[in-house]
Image (cartoon, rainbow, N blue to C red):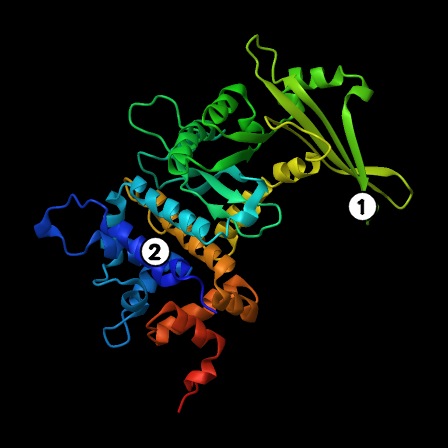
Amino acid sequence: MNPKKHLSFGSLRNGLSSVFHDIPDTRESVKIDYHIHDAMMSGFACMYFQDPSLLQFQERLRDAENRDNLQTLFGVSNIPKDTQLREIIDEVESEQLTPIFKDYFSRLQRGKHLLQYQLFDGLYICSIDGTQYFNSPNIHCPSCLTTTHENGEISYSHKVLQAAIMHPDMRQVIPLMPEEIRNTDGDSKQDCEINAAKRLIPKIKKAHPQLGLIFVGDDLFSKQPFISDVLAAGNHFIFIVKPKDHKYLMEWIDAYDKEDINELRIIDQKERIHIYEWVNNVPLNGRADSINVNFFRYKIITMDKNGNEIVTYKNSWVTDLEISRENIAILVRGGRCRWKIENECFNTLKNQGYHIEHNYGHGEKKLCFNFFLLTLLAFFFHQIFELTDHLYQACRKKFGSKQNLWQTLRAYIRILVFETWEHLLNFALTPRKYKVSFQPP
């Protein structure tokens, strides 16, 4: 029932531990009471068990006769106080965590778990989108983005551009190292999602040079400068195009005679009509140096009780992949897959126990983003287990919701010490087998 060794909790934790040990420590040796490894791993453990209170999480794990689950499960030698933990993590350069995302991705490749994510032979969907994970009218740091409201008040926020491998048929998403959207000293303009995307594309290419990627995203990315960057890196794209933002392209499409626009109609078992339309090799814009793209659109039509047609969904995209009757439905599914980064990634992180918008601490340098990364890594662990670990899957089935599972696991580690992650899961599945009674004597 155990996953392959390189995808087990112990092996994944050892990989993370190695990255934490490799983080340079610029502090004076005489002033070091707690190592970076122990601070980072303690923070990760809190995110892993989805505890909303960093302080209470640490205090609870200090029980059990000086021997706690931070030591047995996460290899923490000396547990820092919450204030010291935040000070240490605030100084860690976030890019130091890049290798572990590549490592875990490679482990999934090695286990052939990513083959099921191919949209076409050798090509994977990589959805990119931005999200906000911190906002405050008062708390801020030099990296904060600022918003001036109509009443003159200023709010401060942190945002990130996330990339993730996904497939229309897969619930699990595979996160890549994200790009922080942050202000930097000396820049007169605020950072933004598109600039973060321009930084992220070459980083992904460097980390995964042989990986065939189809980037999918919203209308923000379907502009020529960014598309050119995607193509220059050897990637493909499927980006949404909104008529109001691509008037020249839409005028070009509208100028076609109806019989010159390729069309495919399918009626499904629920009697919904699926209409696919496409035209290859059209200019993206009216510039003299406009690139040509392949345009497609899709809508779903249903009938109301009076027999009237109702359009329940419609959208349009551009891509560099040539469109045909054989692949149009797949391309639409790939384009619509963009929503998964909202639902399966951001919504899960914000609303299903990970507390990604909770202020564990803001700091002055890297603390806020580093806590986001630690939470994302915890999410990555759990996604891997959902794909590969039958024991974890059995626990998910037993407890129903993720929140119920993690609430139960947190309760167990407050009162018992477990030597391994597998020991904890086995106990959660069949506590009676261990002859432990929770009833008062």
The residue identified by callout 2 is 44
Query: Above or below — where is 171 with respect to 284?
Result: below
Front-most of 39 and 111?
A: 111
Disc 2 element = helix
Query: Above or below — where is 278 with respect to 123?
Result: above
Is there any visible trace of residue 192 in the rendered image? yes
Give how far across and how far down residue 266 sits, in percent: 80, 39
Is there any visible trace of residue 51 in the rendered image? no
Front-most of 95 and 160?
A: 95
Q: Residue furthest left?
A: 30
Give how far across and how far down residue 351 sits, in percent: 52, 53
Q: In which quarter of the image is residue 58?
A: bottom left
Give how far across and how far down residue 14 sits, in percent: 31, 58
The residue identified by callout 1 is 268
Chain-order first, disc 1 or disc 2: 2
Q: In which quarter of the image is residue 71?
A: bottom left
The amino acid marked with disc number 1 is Asp
Give how far across and how far down residue 53 sits, in percent: 37, 59
Label 1 – label 2 distance at C-alpha: 46 Å
